[in-house]
Amino acid sequence: MATHGSPTHYETLGVDPSASSDAVRKAYLKRARDHHPDFHTTATSAKRQENEREMQRINQAWTVLGDPLKRRAYDDMLLGGSTSGPSAPTGPAPARYDFVPYDDDDTDYAALLDDTPTNAVRMERSVQMAPAICLAIGLAMVIVGAIAQIGFALALGVAGVVIAIIGFLAAPAVAISRSLQSERES
């Protein structure tokens, strides 16, 4: 409920209360991009603080409207109905992650737990395990090459460790690019 002239969460995100979850999500992303302080690094200190405050309001609105149960309770509160159920949080909510680790079967645990959106990005097991396997093989080759004094095995092991480190560093970039691609498609 808007109190003392403060905007509702719907007004903060610029959506109608009847908007779909997808429309609310898109409005949140657009407003977050427009007001995120990191995009206003050259702005004056006052303008930057204004964007920080607006970003806090946007995050607060998303915390409530992004969760179906909290949104339903908030709608009831706006309509003057039941005030039972979860109240609007006063602080930031835990982050929601679009990344879902590999899974051996077809059970969609994320959907069962309702922790991640339905368009969550899934990565194949081979993509996730490749850096760890490469590191293990590389370290084994370094040890064998050092003990047996085989230069080729040592060089191959060092190359494997370097490739593994690059793989560990590239994994977040791959996850982010897949998430962005998924976002564009939705």
Image: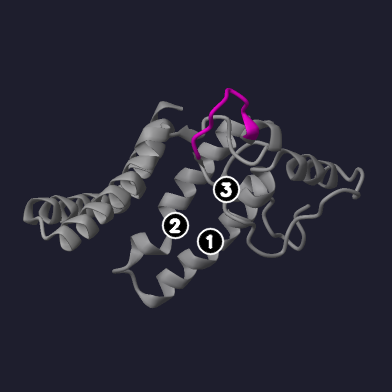
Residue annotated with mark 3 = 96
176 horizontally vs 98: left or right: left
Q: As drawn, is 108 to the left or to the right of 36? A: right
Colouring method of the image: one colour
Residue 78 placed where, x, y %? Answer: 81, 46
Q: Earlier in the sequence, mark 3 or mark 2?
A: 2
Residue 54 disc label:
1
Q: CA distance from mark 1 to mark 2?
A: 7 Å
Q: What residue type is disc 1 on? A: Glu
Please tell me whether residue 102 belongs to the stretch shown in magenta. yes
Badge 1 local density, few (<14 within 10 Å), some, or many (20+)? Answer: some
Question: Which amino acid type corresponds to the residue marked 2 in the rendered image?
Answer: His
Q: Which residues are magenta?
A: 101-109
- Please name which of the two marks, 3 or 1, marks the residue nearer to the observer: 3
Contact (CB < 8 A) between labels 1 and 2? yes
Q: Main secondary structure of the magenta part?
A: loop
